[in-house]
Amino acid sequence: MSVFAVLDPAVRLAHDAVSALAAVVPTALAVVLFTALVRLALHPLARSAARGEKARMRLAPKVAELNRRHKGKPEKLQAALTELYREEKSSPFAGFLPMLVQIPFFSVMYRLFTTPNDLLGHTLAGVPLGLHLGEARTAGQYAVLGALYAAIGAVCWVGFRRARRAWAASPGPGGASAAAAASPTAAGAPAVPGARLLPYLSFGTVLFAAFVPLAAGLYLLTTTAWTAAERAWLHRGSPVPATAAALAA
């Protein structure tokens, strides 16, 4: 039995919800609306994650100073960091748990839009929602898929620019952001090889979309756009950690 079988009950519920929406609006729009509704339900978790990121950024200068002061003394550094987080009533892992809790929800939605079902037989501008790029044969199919990939790419470009700005505005050793100093692995750890390439990871969403059905691509577009707008709202007036901005898309 597939390890994903445990998700089947939730996938069936999601299927029924999308089908109910599709009885009122076109199925492609129902996919978008369902994705937006799920992201709206998960918004409290996103707010909690944003608070954790802001706490780590606020403590980043102090963490960097402790790293400098206790360089080569891992025991003293760990003790100092523990005391700092205790005094600040925070944690180096603040904000990570809410992000992890969201994974099952996204797994259900991905499985719904990639597993053969009746929803994928519906169309968008005459193109089946279950169509992959490799199965496209007509100019109309390529046009619809191309427009989708272009839209996803545009959203990823916004995330890429935010990540680059955050990286440039956050001084640190080797070009690393100040927020990176507050990460759970920063204590005495060397710079991550290739870290400057992290902002480019946002464009991986476009590549991924090319290997999934059109319905899944609509999901990716909606959830990526939601993430970009949500992070811009939650982090308004404050810089976004470069790595977080890159991976969010």
Image (cartoon, rainbow, N blue to C red):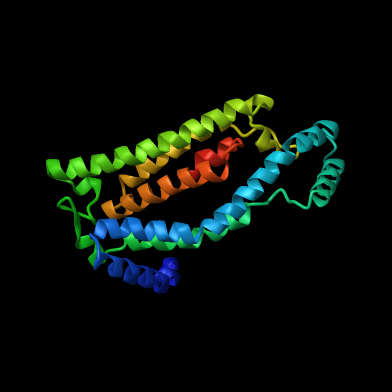
Total numbered labels? 0
Q: Residue at x 57, y 57 (%)?
A: 45
Q: Residue at x 56, y 41 (%)?
A: 244
Q: Is residue 209 visible?
A: yes
Question: Would residue 128 appear left or right of 234 to someone viewing this image?
Answer: left
Q: Residue at x 33, y 68 (%)?
A: 15
Q: Position of residue 18 (x, y in %)?
A: 32, 66
Q: Position of residue 153 (x, y in %)?
A: 36, 37
Q: Position of residue 24 (x, y in %)?
A: 25, 66
State which quarter of the image contains the N terminus. Answer: bottom left
Q: Is residue 110 visible?
A: no
Nearer the observer, 107 or 154: 154
**Is 213 situated above or below 72?**
below
- The image quarter containing residue 110 is bottom left
Q: Position of residue 101 (x, y in %)?
A: 56, 60
Question: Would residue 153 appear left or right of 199 to someone viewing this image?
Answer: left
Nearer the observer, 174 or 151: 151
Nearer the observer, 122 or 130: 122
Residue lying furthest bottom: 9
